[in-house]
Amino acid sequence: MKIAMTGSSGFIGTALCEALTKKGHTIVPVVRTSFDPQSNVVRWDIHRKFIEKEKFEGCDAVIHLAGANIARKRWSKSYKQEILASRVEGTNLLCDALSGLKNPPNVLLSGSAIGVYGSVAGDQHIDENSPCGQDFLASVCQQWEKATVPAQQAGIRVVHLRTATVLSRSVCNKQGINSDFRI
């Protein structure tokens, strides 16, 4: 399959690109900067509302993982705005581009998070049918998922990937956390 991916240089994206490439898939990174216009990448700039949408033609799937790192720094008012904007504006730009294609991809796997459920206490069971939360992250996730509507309306199957905290053996080892787990 030919798969375009935003966030391909991030924590999850890097590992996913490697795994998909090993399985024989072709990855087309969606990047903010590229010095070679002939390279096998899609350039985009969320702030300028620019995306090379024609380069999505022929892609079987798009994986959308881009967004400001929520663990990078303290959540000041301005950083909260950056967290929200990086997800919602980026998803709007991407989905508007995909919805305008002659041959859109079959599926869009769009990042989201379990934060959509808000703060959950104790052993409360939650699943994709559970109600959404009311806090900041829940609001971000709800707006992020809603931004995929143009792709859905264009007939693209949209899957919201609601991840929890993602760890790696190397990060755990650096932090002194037992990394004897299997994936």
Image (cartoon, helix red, strand yellow):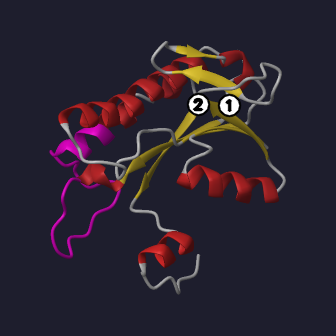
Q: Quadrant of the N terminus?
A: top right
Quadrant position of residue 40 = top right
As helix, strand or loop, the secondary structure at mark 2 comes to loop
Residue 119: assigned label: none
Q: Which residue position is annotated with label 1?
A: 105
Residue 156: assigned label: 2
Disc nearer the start of the sequence (1/2) = 1
The crowd level at tag 2 (other Cα within 10 Å; few <14, some 14-19, many 20+) is: many
Residue 25: % across, % down: 80, 48
Q: Amino acid at mark 1?
A: Pro
Q: In the figure, is residue 119 to the left or right of 102?
A: left
The answer to whether residue 127 is magenta is yes
Q: In the figure, is residue 110 to the left or right of 141?
A: right
Q: Which residues are magenta?
A: 118-141
Residue at image point 24% right, 31% down: 78
Residue at image point 32% right, 33% down: 84
Magenta span: predominant SS is loop
Residue 133: % across, % down: 19, 49
> Is there a contact, CB below 8 Å, between mark 1 and mark 2?
yes
